[in-house]
Image (cartoon, helix red, strand yellow):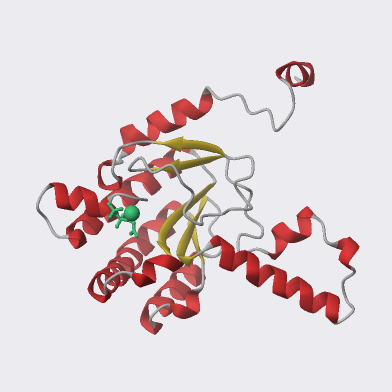
Amino acid sequence: MDGNGRWATQRGFSRVQGHRRGKDSVKEIVETARELGIEFLTLYAFSTENWERPEREVDALMRLLRHYLRSEVNKMMRHGIRLRAIGNLRRLPREVLSDIRAVEQRTRANEGMTVQLAVSYGSREELVTAVRRLARKVRDGVLAPEDIDETLVSDSLMTAGIPDPDLLIRTSGEMRLSNFLLWQVAYTELYVTDVLWPDFRRPQFLEALDDYKRRERRFGKTAEQLGQEV
Ligand code: IPE
Ligand code: MG
């Protein structure tokens, strides 16, 4: 979710105003995804690198996150939405973490859609943590190096149990991954739009999904091979 700051600056507003509008986009996209029957939606809300932003902006983002969780939890319950957070959550202010845990706890049995919130998240950090965990198991003699395979690596990441994304949408025109789900997006379809996140609403989301539907996902195979499989 990128472009809140630019959206605000273009209008002579403060960056925080942009984040506030961005929160409205989050609500609309979650709602739309649920209506469409999308089972998993991951939102990259705050990266490990975002901690370097001015304290005032970080504080405002944390406040908005708490507002979002508190104002949406009842709707999540009504709509069967399960929330889970990934990232280095220990870096979060205590009250933010406790709000996240409370919503995770309340929504844990919901089966309609999983919203995965990446907050204080960085994919390299996630990989380092996973490598350390595996290395410890090898050291302790409970895991043989040759038993480390792709499935085990996937299962060692914070996204364990969540399928790899089919589609990654990046707003505001930036052509980069910005440390997001590096392992998980190996075969993900990428969609980049110039639309800034506060303007990314239902119609723009439907357009992205429409574009995705027209893609041919070959996973390294030839088009002919795929034709034979069906
Ligand atoms: C939102 O957009 C992303 C968050 C960290 C919440 P930005 O704040 O990165 O907006 P730009 O890139 O400055 O336009
Ligand atoms: Mg940005």
* In this picture, residue 44 sits left or right of residue 147: left
Q: Quadrant of residue 23?
A: bottom left
**Where's residue 161, x and y in %?**
66, 57
Is residue 118 positioned above or below 202 on the image? Answer: below
**Where's residue 22, x and y in %?**
27, 53
* In this picture, residue 12 sits left or right of residue 52: left
Q: Measuring 21% from the left and 55% from the top, which residue is drawn there? A: 18
Is residue 48 positioned above or below 199 on the image? Answer: below
Q: Quadrant of residue 215?
A: top right
**Where's residue 110, x and y in %?**
53, 58
Q: Measuring 70% from the left and 18% from the top, which residue is drawn there? A: 223
Q: Measuring 58% from the left and 40% from the top, which residue is drawn there? A: 188
Q: Quadrant of residue 73?
A: bottom left
Comparing 194 with 142, the one in front is 194
Is residue 88 positioned above or below 152 on the image? Answer: below
Is residue 39 positioned above or below 126 on the image? Answer: above
- Quarter, ligand 2: bottom left
Comparing 168 with 116, the one in front is 168
**Where's residue 48, x and y in %?**
45, 68
Q: Quadrant of the C terminus?
A: top right
Comparing 52 with 108, the one in front is 52
